[in-house]
Amino acid sequence: MVKAVWNDTVIAESDDTVVVENNHYFPLDAVKPGVLSPSSTTSVCPWKGTASYYIVTAGGRENPDAAWYYPAPKDAAAQIKDRVAFWKGVRVG
């Protein structure tokens, strides 16, 4: 079971992650309710497409843009559609 932990709180866990560029992409339904809220931030990866971000909230604290996903990934990254990955202090393992 792969877990994502931030602020001493398990925010996601799944046996079904997809690893791309050393990042675990979790199915959206593996994320605990109330953890993710939309951010206006986006970025572009040449081969995956445009990423959108979430604010991660756990234990009464917010971590802006600590999760990202590709709402419409390019064909080369189709396996990460409807999945989310974490960074900015979120421990995944």
Image (spheres, helix red, strand yellow):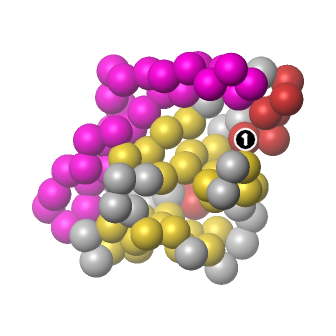
* Vertical relation: 32 (above or below) 28: below
> Which residue is drawn at the image coordinates 72% and 49% (left, top)?
20
- Name the residue nearer the viewer: 30 or 21: 21
Q: Position of residue 75 (x, y in %)?
A: 85, 24
Horizontal side of residue 7 vs 75, given as left or right = left
Q: Dividing the picture into quarters, in which one does residue 45 lie?
A: top right
Q: Quadrant of the C terminus?
A: bottom right
Was residue 40 drawn as part of the magenta stretch in this picture?
yes
Q: Where does label 1 land, which residue?
A: 80
Say few, some or many: other residues with alpha carbon within 10 Å of mark 1 (under 14 / 14 to 19 / 20 or more): many
Q: Dividing the picture into quarters, in which one does residue 18 lie?
A: bottom right
Which region is colored magenta?
37-65
* Residue that sits furthest to the right in the current view: 75
Was residue 86 drawn as part of the magenta stretch in this picture?
no
Q: Quadrant of the N terminus?
A: bottom right
Q: Amino acid at mark 1?
A: Ile
Q: Position of residue 13 (x, y in %)?
A: 56, 70
Q: Position of residue 8 (x, y in %)?
A: 28, 77
> Which residue is drawn at the image coordinates 64% and 69% (left, top)?
14
Could one spot residue 92 in this view of the protein?
yes
- Name the residue nearer the viewer: 86 or 61: 86
* Vertical relation: 59 (above or below) 86: below
Horizontal side of residue 48 vs 85, given as left or right = right
- Name the residue nearer the viewer: 79 or 30: 79
